[in-house]
Amino acid sequence: MSWKELWSSDLQDSLPLRFIVAALFLAGCAAVPLESSTIPHPSSRSGPSAKHEYQEAVGVIHVHSTYSDGLLPVDRIARIANAQGLDYLIITDHNTLQGRREGKQGWHGRTLVLIDDEISTRGGHYLALRLAKEVPRLQDTRWTMEAVSAQGGLGFIAHPFWPRRPWKDLQVRGMTGLEIYNAVGDMTGKKILWLGPWLILTGSEFSITQWLTRQKESLDLWDTTLARGDRVVGIGSTDAHGLRRWGMRLGPYATLFKLVRTHLLLPEISEKAIYNALAGGHAFVAHDMVAEAKGFSFAAVERDKVAGIMGDQVIWGRGLRLYAYLPSPGNLVLFKDGRPAAKERGQQIWFDVPGPGVYRVEATRSGKPWIYSNPIYVIE
Ligand SMILES: [Zn+2]
Ligand SMILES: [Zn+2]
């Protein structure tokens, strides 16, 4: 069986499930079992082309608990993640690792909880992962970034264009990555006034997807940084606080955990593997509330073999092609060096690689943003 046939057989197996999930969404059901997909990740299949043996870990990044200004304690948040079948959960309270000192890091049921830090700098918020100890807050931005790197930590620019805490130094280099989507950034201003009553009236998570936007400024910043030759990992963040205003639940953890997830490709689910996948960009960001995203793949393929996955560097050759697999049909845009280079509709999409460059894809469904791959770096 060829690689393409192998992958298309995944679709055949899952068609009834796709239909049921779609019907549940249309019914506005608030409890869609998103974790119930049985689509196996293509790379997990044996076959001549399944060179890499990654598994997919689905989780959420950037969550606040009662250790800072979140509504719920870590244990309760972990239970919500667990109920959704999430593989990992990264708690990032403001300027503290207290949760780790109190033993909250570790497995909570099937979810691995990691306790990290969102550092307030003088020029914006910086998500710092894999820190050994806290970095002082309210320091110069570049100083903070260096302090994180000096500990072997990973650093991500948080909500770079959120009006209340924008990132000021847009020319900065040296971060691991940035948030290409932050849910709080999608719930500001007039929108929040409409979204709250709408949620209460409809009780439907499906309706939230109507408010989803492509966060163009963050994506443009990412593209600009990639185009100048930097390796920058894109992550999706919930920034969940369990927000309540005027007696309304405007940002429940459970809702945000379905709205944006960061899917990782890794050899196993462990603390080390999660951080390595994030450091290496073996990741994609998805709005799983729009449609199930598990199983998505974007790879460089040469002579029917996977030459590299998202985050990898691949040497350009005439036979090199890019392959995107969507768990269900959608529209796909290929970006080369930060600019749209090709558009296709379908489920299994091939692109020729005209030459070296930085390649990433974005998928949409029904006009809504859905999946953002991390780039593949094709070099001479
Ligand atoms: Zn923040
Ligand atoms: Zn935050």
Image: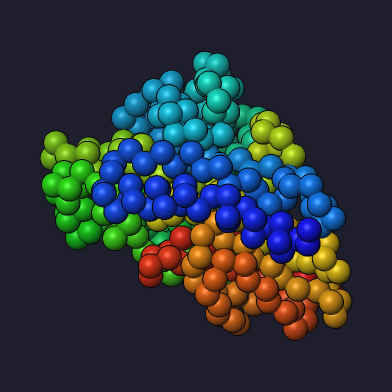
List x then y, in percent, for residue 327.
Answer: 55, 56
In-front residue for pair 271/225? 271
Q: Is residue 330 visible?
A: yes
List x then y, in percent, for residue 120.
Answer: 46, 44
307 left or right of 137?
A: right
In this rendering, the answer to whether 352 lies above or below 155 is below
Quadrant including the N terminus: bottom right
Q: Is residue 233 visible?
A: no
Image quarter of residue 231: bottom right
What residue is shown at x 77% (from left), y 77% (from top)? 356
List x then y, in percent, for residue 271.
Answer: 66, 31
In this rendering, the answer to whether 173 lies above or below 19 is below
Image quarter of residue 81: top left
What residue is shown at x 54% (from left), y 28% (from top)? 111
Exactly how many numbered labels are in the figure?
0
List x then y, in percent, for residue 187.
Answer: 29, 54
310 left or right of 252?
A: right
What residue is shown at x 34% (from left), y 26% (from top)? 72
What residue is shown at x 59% (from left), y 81% (from top)? 342
287 left or right of 201?
A: right
In-front residue for pair 229/248? 248
In-front residue for pair 337/266? 266
